[in-house]
Amino acid sequence: MRIAVIPARGGSKRIPRKNIKLFSGKPVIAWSILAAQKSELFDAVIVSTDDQEIAEISKDFGAEIPFVRPHNLSDDHTATVPVIAHSVAECTKLGMQIEWATCIYPCSPLIQIEDLKHAVGLAETKLVDFVYPVTEYPHPIQRAMRMRSCGAMEFLDPSFELTPTQDLDIAFHDAGQFYVGKCSAWLEHKRMHTAGIAIPIPSWRVADIDTVEDWNRAELIHRIFLS
């Protein structure tokens, strides 16, 4: 069977209660839950949380909360893989025979069902450990600069200072929306990025929501283009 796991802890410092803050009229986690449900890819949509309010809101939108995430997997430094591995293990104890588990982040309101379907289909066809979305950096990272205290700029790698941008390799970064993964890969704590393959998506549909400015930009995109 396939499951979707949405990891949503209660603590959030930069945007308080971020995972249930209203986004375009719904708690932001609801958009991830609804995308998973509407995709019709998953036998269960599960929220892993340590927070009672998040649990109740998630249930209101049809997600399952079959266990409570332990405190040692709910702090600021807990990585994604241990959380999903814990979820897979707990669901297995409940009798679920899981082959694929897809992690969907709770603050992914720009997620598209077609991307989920593409990734799941690719994972099952290619039989890889993970599939996840990436997008291009808007400018060649080889020409990145740092600012010194006096305001002067310096290249991180001066050898690229005079290289035309069209001659530089395109670089990508994780879109931070979801990871389709084999149950065994999660349980073995494999690294999603190096153990998987990627699907490119447009940069305008990628939003890493960490600040109020990020939030407002993502909400504007959602209302104009995706509602």
Image (cartoon, grey):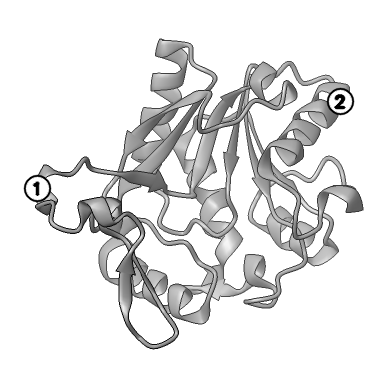
**Residue at position x 80%, y 34% in the image:** 86
Q: Position of residue 69 (x, y in %)?
A: 85, 47
Please tell me whether residue 153 is drawn above or below residue 49 in the rendered image. Answer: below
Give the structural element (helix, strand or loop) at label 1. helix
Q: Amino acid at mark 1?
A: Gln
Q: Position of residue 115 (x, y in %)?
A: 37, 38
212 lies above or below 207:
below
> Where is residue 193 drawn, in percent x and y?
51, 33
For label 2, the SS is loop
Instruction: Report the mark closest to the observer, 2 or 1.
Output: 1
Residue 218 in the figure: left or right of residue 41: left
Question: Which residue carries the number 1 mark?
Answer: 166
Query: Local crowd at mark 2 within 10 Å, few (<14), some, or many (≥20)?
Result: few
Considering only vertical position in the picture, is 109 above or below 87?
Answer: below
For disc 1, the neighbor class at 10 Å (few under 14, some 14 to 19, many from 20) is few
| Residue 34 vertical placement versus 123 (above, below) | below
Q: Position of residue 154 (x, y in %)?
A: 32, 69
Image point 60% across, 59% down: which residue? Answer: 29
Q: Amino acid at mark 2?
A: Leu
Q: Nearer the viewer, residue 130 or 7?
A: 130
Q: CA distance from mark 2 to mark 1?
A: 54 Å
Q: Which residue in the protein does label 2 denote?
A: 94
Q: Horizontal placement of 219 versus 72: left or right?
A: left
Question: Which of marks 1 and 2 precedes in the sequence?
Answer: 2
User: Residue 114 sits in which quadrant?
Assistant: top left
Query: Where, quadrant-wise, is the C terminus in this rendering?
Result: bottom left
Tell me the residue at 71%/70% (across/down). Answer: 12
Q: Which mark is residue 121?
A: none
